[in-house]
Amino acid sequence: MSQLSAIIIGANAGLSQTLARKLAAEGVRLGLLAADRPALQPLLDQLPDTTLCNEIDIFDPDQCRQALDQLWQQLEGAQLVIINTAANHQDLDLPWLADKMVVDVNVTGFTALANAAFARFRQQKYGQLAAITSIAGERGGASSAFHASKAYQQNYLQGLRLHAQRLKLPVTVSDLRLGYIDKMQARGSKTWGASLEVVADQILANLKKAKATSYVTRRWRLVSWIGRLLPEFIYNKRKYR
Ligand SMILES: NC(=O)c1ccc[n+]([C@@H]2O[C@H](COP(=O)([O-])OP(=O)(O)OC[C@H]3O[C@@H](n4cnc5c(N)ncnc54)[C@H](OP(=O)(O)O)[C@@H]3O)[C@@H](O)[C@H]2O)c1
């Protein structure tokens, strides 16, 4: 395998597509996994013909694993797998089905894919597994299932990282904790929201440094630090949008 290869999961997201374009511009061969394969066409039109893609049903963990394995075989391995698939809802009535959907996507679907990617890297004996998590994983919040699912993802990634260290394998596991990307600016977060370009550039820079945990954008490290210090009665005074 002379050319570097990367797999991006959740490829229809704006962030995934920005990452894909930037990686392709660096000469990385891409494998894309997405729920809606036809919707990938406009992106594929901008990427080299060597780009491969496959469909996943995130609610079917076994199918997801098979689709990842298939893509892996077609690419003859990969140096990088980025998981960028996640669901969220914010309904203060906390409807069970909405919470269940978040758990299905962010916990069960995520684990199926992270576990499969780690197994491949273990077999290959090197590589980098990265997932886009969220600052929300560091403390509970109104979108209870979302916050909890991101905490799970962060903990699972740490477990994989420790496992790779015990196995003495050069497998990097990167937890990229996002603040807000710019689609949130429409909801009045101009101070904190960052454009997809900025977010993608910082993600790629952090991946190249093989950082275990990083905050994107960087200012969210400070928010994280303050958030952990705040007593609950103050933390809970935040306005829910
Ligand atoms: N947006 C933000 O400001 C923000 C803030 C903090 C953290 N994050 C995290 O950053 C990552 C990317 O965020 P984003 O806003 O770009 O995500 P997004 O577009 O809402 O979702 C990313 C991908 O997840 C899959 N997905 C989303 N909802 C789904 C559902 N209900 N059922 C099945 N699949 C679903 C889709 O995959 P396909 O492409 O396969 O269809 C989608 O492209 C996520 O992990 C998110 O939690 C985002």
Image (cartoon, rainbow, N blue to C red):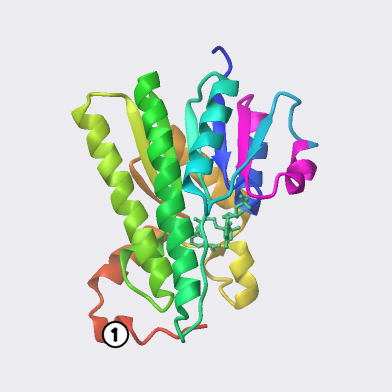
| Ligand 1 in which quarter | bottom right
As drawn, 96 above or below 153: below
Residue under label 1: 234
Residue 105 showing in the rendered view: yes
Residue 182 image position (x, y, % from top left) = 61, 63
As drawn, 29 above or below 101: above
Residue 40 image position (x, y, % from top left) = 73, 44
As drawn, 214 above or below 190: above
Amino acid tagged 1: Ile
Residue 178 showing in the rendered view: no
Residue 70 image position (x, y, % from top left) = 56, 28
Residues rendered magenta in the picture: 23-44
Q: Looking at this view, is 85 or 211 the one in front? A: 85
Is residue 24 part of the magenta span, yes or no? yes
Residue at screen point 58% across, 22% down: 75
Q: Looking at this view, is 150 or 189 the one in front? A: 150
